[in-house]
């Protein structure tokens, strides 16, 4: 396929396979201003699929940086009611949410930490209804990547900007299996593989996972009773399948937020709110980070961990084989959507209620009492390596190899 044909196929994949837009639905589309052509392409496909309307929410990272550097701290502590109501209204209407990601990994370097933290907390609180509906499957959502020059240059620093952008497009198309016109069929097979692995893990019903590798990771993660492994497509509350992440290589579940012990080392840099955090470790006691260190971006790591109580605890564990399309490219994307699918990872912060039996029907307190974490954050960080071993431990004490030399044993 030509580039134009691949881009159109990517837009169709986003709308039909990932978001699965249906007749009469609102589509809430977040798009960077420099990707407006692609945003209009997605909007057109959404209308073709029968969308009642597409609400375009443009954003501009360079303006955001300007605003963070110049506006007063108090500005970021609140979100105007009309902005909150816009998102929450469409969530109540059962909208589909599509976000076009095109992030400069260094865009917020030098921005005061307190402003970024205040903004994150205010937005999470203002859009709480939106996120609650999302977490319970009341709206479908997905992400679609679009290279910007600064992102591409970060990934391919030795190339000219135009060449770097083209190379990043090639990498994105490869990881999304956009090499011919049978893309949807390929993702159906990938979905079946992820579902098979999740089924095996659910059958074991492990109470613990033990991680170990040559970086120094030696961590035991407790899993709550009734946890559920998931991967690939999900079902919204009205029974419609959708694919939240494109690409995806993971199966994931909920850890017990009070039962993680030991130390874990990052294997890839983490891009957090426009700042890179690299070569860091976290030491856990009773599920809480008690000690940490980073060679780069430690202040951003501190900001993340101190956002709220739940930011010091795990909300997700995800297993991804080292031998996978993204990992095999040997490219550091500096973007969590891709890098998390190249490596086993954990998430600090909020858990997914869907990863607990009857979790979507539990109150926040009930979910927490069963081991689910609560936070305004949900930030993935990568820990997988080619020599990672993961051992599952059953309630009878049986040890089962899940990962050997970085890959699944089944």
Image (tube, rainbow, N blue to C red):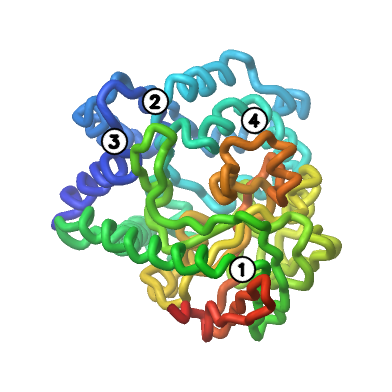
Point out the frontmost of discs 1 and 2.
1
- What residue sits right under mark 3 in the picture? 42
Local packing at callout 2 (Cα closer than 10 Å; few below 14, some 14-19, many 20+) is some
Residue at horizontal 47 percent and vertical 31 percent from the top: 138
Quadrant of image for the N terminus: bottom left
Q: Nearer the viewer, mark 1 or mark 3?
A: 1
| Tag 1 secondary structure | loop
Q: Is residue 406 left or right of residue 143?
A: right
Residue 114 occupies which quadrant of the picture? top right
Report the residue marked by disc 4. 123
Horizontal placement of 319 versus 264: left or right? Answer: left
Q: CA distance from mark 2 to mark 4?
A: 18 Å
Q: Label 3 to label 4, Cα distance in Å? A: 25 Å
Q: Are marks 1 and 2 in contact (CB under 8 Å)?
A: no
300 or 380: which is nearer to us?
A: 380
Which residue appears farthest toward the front when viewing the image?
A: 396
Q: Earlier in the sequence, mark 2 or mark 4?
A: 2
The front one of 92 and 68 is 92
Residue 85 to residue 284: above or below: above
Residue underneath mark 2: 56
* 94 relative position to 279: left or right: left
The residue sitting at the top extreme is: 82
Lower sequence index among marks 1 and 2 = 2
């Amino acid at each position: 396929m030509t580039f134009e044909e691949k881009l159109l196929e990517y837009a169709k994949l986003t709308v039909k396979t990932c978001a699965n837009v249906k007749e009469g639905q609102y589509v809430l589309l977040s798009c960077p201003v420099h990707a407006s052509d692609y945003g209009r392409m997605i909007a057109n496909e959404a209308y073709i699929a029968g969308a009642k309307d597409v609400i375009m929410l443009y954003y501009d990272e360079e303006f955001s940086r300007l605003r963070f550097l110049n506006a007063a701290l108090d500005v970021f502590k609140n979100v105007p009611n009309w902005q909150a109501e816009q998102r929450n209204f469409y969530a109540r209407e059962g909208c589909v949410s599509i976000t076009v990601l095109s992030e400069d990994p260094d865009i917020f370097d030098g921005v005061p930490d307190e402003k970024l933290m205040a903004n994150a907390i205010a937005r999470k609180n203002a859009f709480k209804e939106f996120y609650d509906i999302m977490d319970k499957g009341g709206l479908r959502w997905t992400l679609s990547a679009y290279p910007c020059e600064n992102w591409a240059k970060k990934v391919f620093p030795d190339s000219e900007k135009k060449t770097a952008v083209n190379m990043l497009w090639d990498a994105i198309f490869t990881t999304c299996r956009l090499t011919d016109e049978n893309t949807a069929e390929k993702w159906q097979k990938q979905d079946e593989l992820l579902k098979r692995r999740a089924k095996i893990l659910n059958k074991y019903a492990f109470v613990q996972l033990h991680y170990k590798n040559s970086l120094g990771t030696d961590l035991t993660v407790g899993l709550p009773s009734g946890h559920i492994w998931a991967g690939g497509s999900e079902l919204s509350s009205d029974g419609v399948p959708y694919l939240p992440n494109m690409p995806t290589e993971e199966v994931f579940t909920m850890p017990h937020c009070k039962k993680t012990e030991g130390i874990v080392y990052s294997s890839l840099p983490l891009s957090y709110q426009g700042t890179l955090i690299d070569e860091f470790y976290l030491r856990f006691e009773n599920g809480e980070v008690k000690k940490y260190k980073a060679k780069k971006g430690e202040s951003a790591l501190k900001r993340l961990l101190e956002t709220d109580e739940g930011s010091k605890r795990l909300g997700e564990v995800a297993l991804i084989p080292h031998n996978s399309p993204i990992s095999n490219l040997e490219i550091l994307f500096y973007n969590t959507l891709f890098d998390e699918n190249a490596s086993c990872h954990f998430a600090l912060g909020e858990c997914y209620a869907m990863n607990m039996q009857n979790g979507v029907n539990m109150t926040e307190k009930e979910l927490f009492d069963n081991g689910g974490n609560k936070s305004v954050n949900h930030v993935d960080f990568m820990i997988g390596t080619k020599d990672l071993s993961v051992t599952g431990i059953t309630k009878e004490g049986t040890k089962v190899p899940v990962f050997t030399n970085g890959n699944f044993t089944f």
